[in-house]
Amino acid sequence: MGQIKRFQVMLLFLTAVLLPLVGYGYGTVGHATQQLRLLAAELIQPVLNRQALAISVPTLPHVILDTEPQQLKRQLDVLVDEGLLDRESVVAEQRELTSQGWVTRTTAGVRYRSTPGVLSPQVYYGSARLVRLGEVTLDPQSDGATVATISFNWSANVLAEWVWAPVFNADKRLNQIKNSPQEPIVGSAQLEWQVQEQRWDLVSLQPFKTQ
């Protein structure tokens, strides 16, 4: 009789605590964890491509004068060469306060514009692949939800040729991505079990390990 009661208590524990952590319909707890890892991979992959392999461009149109720092201009010129931006020469007047008072100078520059149907606020330059998924940590919340944290390793799969232009060599993050086939990058993601909808949603993705 005592064994039956212990079995009933254990069954209640599995039903009330463990099954909500991994979602219904997954089977045993070990199998459920594996299924959650597979689901995490499906949710992480497309978001990883959007967040990790994109370069932001200034709000367009954007003017850079010859009297301003030229590093950004050289980078944007690469995007122009790739057909991702349009460029036109401009002439602007600048007022400067000198010892003789205000002086108006004529300065040449370049205006960058979007290419219709090509540019978005971010320019994507490749695709990523998941190399390895780490362990899943489950954190039950007081409202009945559960947060699952999972670490992962990823690397660049395909990169646009223009990212190898010398003008981008000083970009540490881009260099890390270019070296990722040899040294995979560590990231982390959080999934949350939605009680009402009875599903897992990806709520946070950090492609790069925070220091």
Image (cartoon, rainbow, N blue to C red):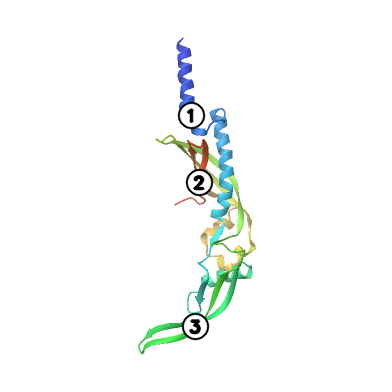
Q: Amino acid at mark 3?
A: Thr
- Where 22 sits versus 173, above or below? above
Which residue lies at the image location 58% right of the left edge and 43% below the top edge?
41
Which residue is labeled 1 in the image?
18
x%, y% of residue 37?
56, 38
Q: Earlier in the sequence, mark 2 or mark 3?
A: 3
Q: Nearer the viewer, mark 2 or mark 1?
A: 1
Which residue is labeled 3 in the image?
107
The residue furthest top is 1
x%, y% of residue 124?
59, 59
Q: Amino acid at mark 1?
A: Leu
Does the rendering let one see residue 201?
yes
Label 3: which secondary element: strand
Label 1: which secondary element: helix
The residue furthest bottom is 100
Q: Nearer the viewer, mark 2 or mark 3?
A: 3
Q: Are marks 3 and 1 in contact (CB under 8 Å)?
A: no
Label for residue 120?
none
Left or right of residue 77, residue 205 in this image:
left
- Where 83 sits versus 152, above or below? below
Mark-to-mark CA distance, 3 and 1: 69 Å
